């Protein structure tokens, strides 16, 4: 009995001592961890946009173009593009304010409307004319070619490709200009863009290919790659490649960005303004918005917009 009392006393004393003592827990080991990449190692996030400009914007466009970096391409390549009616420049992450003036919807001017159009306008049926034709964000893998439609469908067109003293002529129906863009991440946050113009023309024809261990049948037009005008640029996140025709909008500039008078057909009650100016040319913008280096070491530009246009 006495032994049990002694053991109980010792147990109580130990419990009291432990309760009053400071209990230390082993320190947690700290380690440097990187956030998970949101895109594949060899992928690049791109913003692609095509806008239709009109005759009322000529001065604004030339001012805008003058604020871009036109020296990124080698002089020899710039001369070949200019000879064929095309021009290329690089826009910094901070776009000039003229960009929004170029691509924002053209507002309705009531004073220039006829009576019928004024009635539509009062009922909210006459909407501003959209200048931005397309805008999409894609993730492109290394060596993968993505095609961008830059022109309307021309009922028929002829072309001559100038390359020094050599000339290559062609003709087609249902002609559409496209740009094939291939990306190559450089590992330092920059991306090499390879741009190749392509002329798609003729009736769509069935074409058999192989994919997923089976035969695939798809319809496609005849494709004429214009390797003479292929070029490449290295851009960093936030920078944009901008492409447009030269002032006269002729030659290949007309094929890829001009108008042949076959504009889209719109319904009578569609949001069409009466004083619609004459379309002049289109504008292509390709912006690098994300690389894996952005994911690892900095805040990604993925949520930044190419423009503050209300369309977005």
Image (cartoon, grey):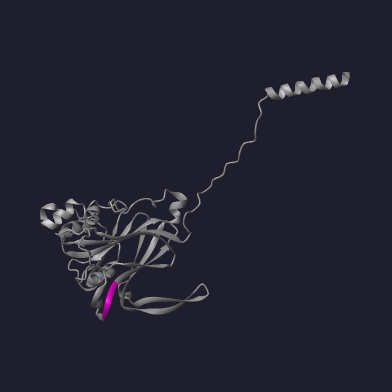
Q: Is residue 7 left or right of residue 125?
A: right
Relative to the observer, which residue lies in front, 271 or 107? 271
Name the residue rendered at 23%, 62% in the picture. 52
Extreme right residue here?
1
Q: Residue at x 20, y 63 (%)?
A: 268
Residue 251 drawn above or below residue 306: below
Can the viewer see residue 237? yes
User: Residue 115, image x and y in percent?
Assistant: 11, 56
Tell me the magenta residue range: 170-176
* Residue 178 falls in image quadrant: bottom left
**For the image shown, how many numbered marks are present on the structure?**
0
* Residue 182 pos. (x, y %): 39, 67
Q: Is residue 137 above or below residue 169?
A: above
Q: In the rendered view of the protein, which quadrant contains the N terminus? A: top right
The residue sitting at 18% across, 66% down in the picture is 247
The answer to whether residue 163 shows anywhere in this view is no
Q: Position of residue 36 (x, y in %)?
A: 51, 51
Q: Is residue 271 left or right of residue 30?
A: left
* Image-based side of 39 in relation to 115, left or right: right
Task: Say if the magenta span includes residue 166.
Answer: no
What type of secondary structure mainly makes up the magenta span?
strand
Q: Position of residue 50 (x, y in %)?
A: 29, 62
Residue 273, quarter of the rendered image:
bottom left
User: 4 left or right of 23?
Assistant: right
Q: Residue at x 76, y 20 (%)?
A: 13
Residue 125: image quadrant is: bottom left
């Amino acid at each position: 009995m006495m032994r049990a009392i002694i053991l109980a006393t010792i147990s109580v004393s130990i419990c009291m001592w432990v309760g009053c003592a400071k209990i230390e827990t082993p320190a947690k080991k700290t380690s440097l961890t990187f956030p998970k990449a949101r895109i594949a190692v060899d992928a690049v996030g791109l913003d692609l946009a095509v806008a239709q400009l009109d005759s009322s914007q000529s001065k604004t466009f030339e001012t805008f173009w003058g604020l871009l970096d036109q020296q990124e391409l080698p002089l020899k390549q710039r001369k070949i593009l200019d000879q064929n009616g095309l021009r290329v420049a690089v826009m910094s992450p901070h776009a000039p304010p003229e960009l929004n003036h170029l691509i924002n919807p053209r507002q309705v001017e009531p004073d220039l409307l006829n009576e019928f159009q004024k009635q539509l306008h009062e009922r909210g049926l006459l909407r501003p004319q959209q200048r931005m034709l397309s805008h999409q964000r894609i993730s492109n893998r290394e060596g993968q070619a993505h095609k961008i439609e830059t022109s309307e469908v021309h009922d028929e067109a002829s072309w001559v490709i100038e390359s020094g003293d050599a000339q290559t002529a062609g003709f087609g129906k249902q002609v559409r200009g496209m740009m094939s863009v291939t990306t190559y991440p450089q590992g330092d946050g920059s991306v090499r863009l390879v741009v190749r113009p392509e002329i798609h023309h003729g009736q769509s024809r069935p074409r058999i290919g192989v994919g997923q261990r089976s035969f695939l049948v798809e319809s496609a037009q005849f494709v004429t790659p214009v390797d003479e005008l292929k070029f490449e640029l290295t851009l960093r996140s936030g920078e944009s490649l901008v492409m447009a025709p030269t002032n006269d909008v002729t030659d290949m500039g007309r094929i890829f960005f001009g108008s042949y008078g076959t504009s889209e057909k719109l319904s009578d009650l569609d949001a069409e303004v009466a004083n619609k100016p004459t379309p002049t040319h289109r504008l292509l913008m390709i912006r690098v918005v994300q690389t894996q280096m952005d994911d690892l070491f900095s805040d990604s530009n993925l949520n930044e917009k190419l423009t503050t246009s209300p369309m977005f």
